[in-house]
Amino acid sequence: MQQTSLILEAKEVNIRDLLRDKFFEIPIYQRPLSWTEDNFQKLVDDIKDAIDSGEESYFLGAIILKRKDDITYEIVDGQQRLTSLLILLAVFRDYLNEYKLHRWLIDEGDEYAGIPARERIKVWKDFHNMFLEYIYAPAGRQYIVVAIYIKVQS
């Protein structure tokens, strides 16, 4: 019987280094995104408080990853926080009109080298189209407001 070795590595990583040249998948066994407005607000408040108090870093919490290949990881734990952070990045990208933030959401690939664009996080199947339209698309958060307005008016 062949034995597989398990290597565990714990380290502190900033979000830039975590997202740089890496891609993530949320396995089917993980629960779907369930954060409420209160969860998002607490995250934003915590980050703002850390900035206001002059802290150089903010502890987002533990994220457990399982390597699939050189650049792709399954998110074993921390998918709610990591996904929420990407949603916040999309909001900042659109609100600040700062397209440079987009590369942290999607690697645009290289058309000439035949490398397709790829989402930084491959989310749950049920949420994939919503993320493509509202999170990964530049100015997508504006469409959320319109979609909610249309739904309320119906």
Image (spheres, grey):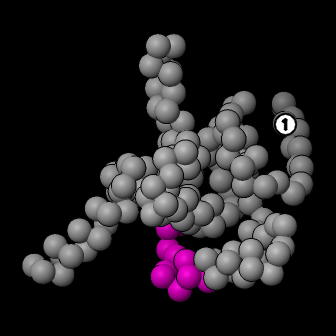
Q: Residue at (59%, 63%) from the top-left corner?
A: 85
Magenta includes 72?
no
Q: Is residue 96 visible?
A: yes
Q: Quadrant of residue 7?
A: top right
| Residue type, numbered disc 1 | Thr
Residue 108 pos. (x, y %): 49, 33
Mark 1 residue element: loop
Magenta includes 41?
yes
Q: Quadrant of residue 152?
A: bottom left
In the image, residue 63 above or below residue 73:
below
Q: Residue at (12%, 80%) from the top-left corner?
A: 153
Q: How many numbered badges does the structure rendering display?
A: 1
In the image, residue 54 above or below residue 135:
below
Per the picture, the main secondary structure of the magenta-coloured stretch is: loop
Instruction: For label 1, count other residues whose C-alpha is less than 10 Å away and answer few (under 14), some (14-19) or many (20+).
Output: few
Q: Compare residues 52 and 27 and report the one nearer the observer.
A: 52
Q: Compare residues 32 and 4 and report the one nearer the observer.
A: 32
Q: Residue at (59%, 47%) from the top-left corner?
A: 104
Residue 95 pos. (x, y %): 45, 63
In the image, residue 136 above or below residue 148:
above
Which residue position is annotated with label 1?
4
Quadrant location, the C terminus: bottom left
Is 52 placed left or right of 31 in the picture?
Answer: right
The span picked out in magenta is 28-42
Residue 41 pos. (x, y %): 56, 82
In the image, residue 70 above or below residue 150:
above
